[in-house]
Amino acid sequence: MLFHLLYDVLAKLEGLGFLRVFRYISTRILAAAITALVISFVLGPWFIDRLKRRQIGQQIRDDGPESHHKKAGTPTMGGSLILFAFVMATLLWCDLRNHFVWLTLAVTVGFGVVGFMDDYMKIAHKNTRGLPGKFRLGIEFMIAGAAMSYLFLSGMLDPTLRLQLQLPFTNFYGSSLHLPLWGYVAFASVVVVGTANAVNLTDGLDGLAIGPTIINAGTFLVFAYLSGVETTLLVHVAGEVRSQNLAEYLHIAHIRGSVELAIFCAGMLGAGIGFLWYNTYPATVFMGDVGALSLGAAIGMLAVLTKNELTLLLVGGIFVVEALSVIIQVGSYKMRRKRVFLMAPIHHHYELKGWEEPKIIVRFWLISVLLALLALGTLKLR
């Protein structure tokens, strides 16, 4: 909204031509990050106080580590603040004519609503169960499936690449994998739902989930910018000088319009940093399912829309390991009546081994940074 006011209206007035700077995506990326950060900082204390007054506190698992029982009653559903901050930043600074932005916002808010319902059920019944698992997954797949069907049937993506799956470390224009329409819709839906629930499983320690989320947002900001920006380069190919955009130069998919998603990523990054101020150990507020599911769905959508579904396994490696630890633990117990880990997700395993909570959190953050750097390295190692 501010983008259209400043650039489309005011910048055309005499003496206000300097506002044309807002046509640049880099300017709006900075503006979105700062806007979301300021909203989180300013509204944070008021929001946490309101949660306390309404006694919206965290319910703690009975079978969890003993150290967690002191966290009972800590305000939860703080993800509502994250969601509000980066959605507002996106609406203020994005080109609202961009369909990728609206589709990503719809899925993100949709999963946020599911998370809100889950949190509400836990608080209302004062237990950790929330919505029945199958029912919640059913709603999530309905949202993701509807969004993916619209994406691949509406013509939003270039017909020459819409069903092409980009393989890391390979040239997209020579080594991509073609999937049938139904296969890509199903696969992309699993990516979104799987990422949302993986982030939700990771959200078990103070700041553990929001740290890698911030890192993922920054990484996909780069991917979205490079895949969508129209900047051209003059390169020498076989003795000839040719004009190429950045995506073609890097041998990645060029997706027209995806550059606006970089502003969405910037908003998520800024909101995440602002929330971390209150969520860092010892946390004064938890994000709850409303935050974890919406942020995870947003990351999944960014992976699909930038053709980085497989690279997500690397960028979001922490989330992948957390989810796999639960799958392995449940599968092992059902098949052999034996547990692989002391407790799943895996961060609880390290807690029960005697690691201090801050040590687990920071080490997981550092691993996430390393994985993000390796993912960015795929841009050149092709």
Image (tube, helix red, strand yellow):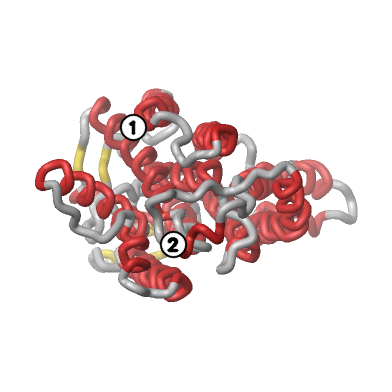
Q: Is residue 298 visible?
A: yes
Residue 66, numbered circle: 2
The Cα atoms of the two marked residues, 2 and 1, are separated by 55 Å
> What amino acid type should be assigned to the residue bearing mark 1?
Pro
> What amino acid type should be assigned to the residue bearing mark 2?
Glu
Name the residue at 23% across, 61% down: 169
x and y percent of residue 48 in the render?
A: 71, 53
The image shows a total of numbered marks equal to 2
Q: Is residue 342 above or below residue 298?
A: below
Name the residue at 38% across, 51% down: 63
Q: Is residue 338 left or right of residue 10?
A: left
Q: Quadrant of the C terminus?
A: bottom left
Query: Which residue is disc 1 drawn over?
Result: 159
Depth check, mark 2 against mark 1: the one in front is 2
Q: Residues within 10 Å of mark 2 (few under 14, many from 20)?
A: few
Q: Is residue 79 left or right of residue 358?
A: right
Question: Looking at this view, is 232 or 131 the one in front?
Answer: 131
Is there a contact, CB below 8 Å, between mark 2 and mark 1?
A: no
Name the residue at 35% across, 74% down: 354
x and y percent of residue 175 in the render?
A: 18, 50
Residue 221, numbered circle: none
Question: Looking at this view, is 122 or 170 the one in front?
Answer: 122
Q: Is residue 31 left or right of residue 334?
A: right
Name the residue at 39% across, 68% down: 364
Element on which disc 1 rests: loop
